[in-house]
Amino acid sequence: MNSMLSTAERERLLKMARAAKLERSAPRIPPITPVERDGRLALSFAQQRLWFLEQLGGLGGTYHLPQGLRLRGALDRAALARALERIVARHESLRTVFVAVAGEPEQRVVPVEESGFRLVEHDLRGRADADGALEALTAREMEAPFDLERGPPVRASLVRLADDDHVLLVTMHHAVSDGWSMGVFGGELRALYTAFSQGLPDPLPPLPVQYADYAAWQRRWLEGEVLDAQAAYWTRTLAGAPELLELPADRPRPPRQDFAGASLRLELDEALTAGLKALAQRHGTTLFVTVLAGWAAVLARLSAQDDVVIGTVSANRARPEVEGLIGFFVNTLPVRVDLSDGLRVDELVERVKTRTLEAQRNQDIPFEQVVERVRPVRSLAYTPLFQALFAWQNASDGALELPGLTVGDVDGAEGTTAKFDLSLAMWETGGRIAGALQYATALFDAATVERFAGYLRLVLQGMVADEARRVDALPMLPAAERELVLDAWNDTDAGYPRGACVHEMFRAQAARTPDAVALSWRGETWTYAELDA
């Protein structure tokens, strides 16, 4: 019977079986219920850490979630404004402010009429510098700081370029939103705009709970045995892990993390994508695991470390009550990968698979709590536990659809910040694996990151070609770079006076360039004259 199933059907059944296995092994999760609003409303663990980071300052737009939509056609501006206002009214998170009471932060939900949210309109029709003005407005919307104590934590601007050409810019603070939430926002905007532009009432059902209910539930549930069991796993797994992934950077790491970033797009062809799928199927796992294994191999080779920790992302919406909420739910899971002992490709895939499943079974404890339990060396120069991230994303379902409008993205509206040294996001679309490699520009040049992306492609090709091959023997350098390293840089043949001794040649050099640096070590330098003396 199994041979009659299609590949897609087999994958679906495998996923269902794995999900059932995880469900049996996971603790029973209690339902989320509303809490009273007349008492203190605690922040979620993730919110609390983000609030603390904001108090330190210097984050700029690092934790902003911007989105830009180009709307071409007959826009009903009143319906759009009403739809946005209704979304803010529906989701308490978008009307939440954060205040400190006796040094401890708490969240307060502001009534709709006091939220301060409104759609700001700009008219650039007829302006000769419309493109430049739009670019400046987009940058300002992305980077302008939020006042989390006064609110609102969301803002929206509508820029009119022509009667039938508009740009909608929406920015939310990460303390009240995440990637999943932006999808919720798009779905609700479509439903509400469609209804309001046709003179119909709000079609959306009431939300069963709000984010403050989730935060209270999280703090109640993650106590006692649940918290202790998951904390014990992470403490044991991350014991002795390297504090820093020492990647070859173009510049020294600044004493305080610089969040300026840039992004590089990359794509794997159909043949490599199919090969990675086949490799995953042979090991009963997913593309996420196989690509993560390749990414771990590349990072290990680049850093000359056979023990690497890579951050991965969990949507953290196990309860159905929160699936339709806008809020900060996403959790980060550090996956530690040991690449020592002459590991083969098939062994690496199995090891990453095991680590990933373990992480998923212990994903309920917030990353902030993991950091507190593991107690790594803290530094303002880099993030704790890991500095490289890998995220597998679902392919986009296409542009947002609004009646009577053609909707597209706005170039430059996605932001240019980097929370980590390197962040690799991948997804499958049209039979290919595509992605983006985001990097900290304080550390890396674009050309360096392009080389890193090329290394990843070659390592993945090597994994597909021979899964019995040792990971440390996988080809990583392209032919031209390999020739440069092995041949050109090693072409050091040079003539020298055979009748002279080494100390005599050094003394002659010191006479020619006495003030040139001869030695440099841990910040201390010696000139040729000083060394000769």
Image (cartoon, rainbow, N blue to C red):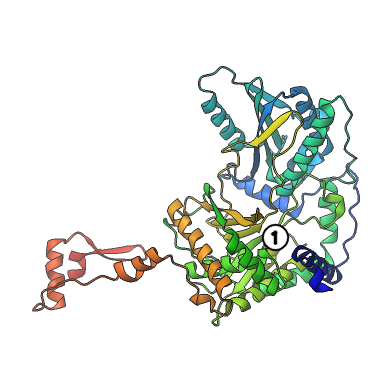
Residue 21 % position (x, y): 83, 71
Q: Is residue 533 visible?
A: no
> Does 302 appear above or below 257?
below
> Does 266 appear above or below 528?
above
Q: Secondary structure at mark 1?
A: helix
Residue 435 % position (x, y): 59, 54
Q: Nearer the viewer, residue 141 or 280?
A: 280
Direction bottom: furthest residue = 341
Quadrant where the N terminus is found in the figure: bottom right
> Does 491 appear above or below 80?
below
Which residue is painted at 71% across and 36% down in the image?
154
Residue carrying label 1 = 367
Q: Is residue 485 left or right of residue 413?
A: left
Residue 95 % position (x, y): 78, 37
Which residue is painted at 66% across and 39% down in the image?
67
Residue 64 % position (x, y): 64, 42
Quarter of the view holding residue 8: bottom right
Q: Amino acid at mark 1?
A: Phe
Q: Residues within 10 Å of mark 1 (few under 14, many from 20)?
A: many
Q: Is residue 44 visible?
A: yes
Q: Is residue 119 left or right of residue 22?
A: left
Quadrant where the C terminus is found in the figure: bottom left
Q: Is residue 219 left or right of residue 148?
A: right
Direction top: furthest residue = 126
The number of discs equals 1
Q: Nearer the viewer, residue 415 or 153?
A: 415
Quarter of the view holding residue 152: top right
Direction front: furthest residue = 4
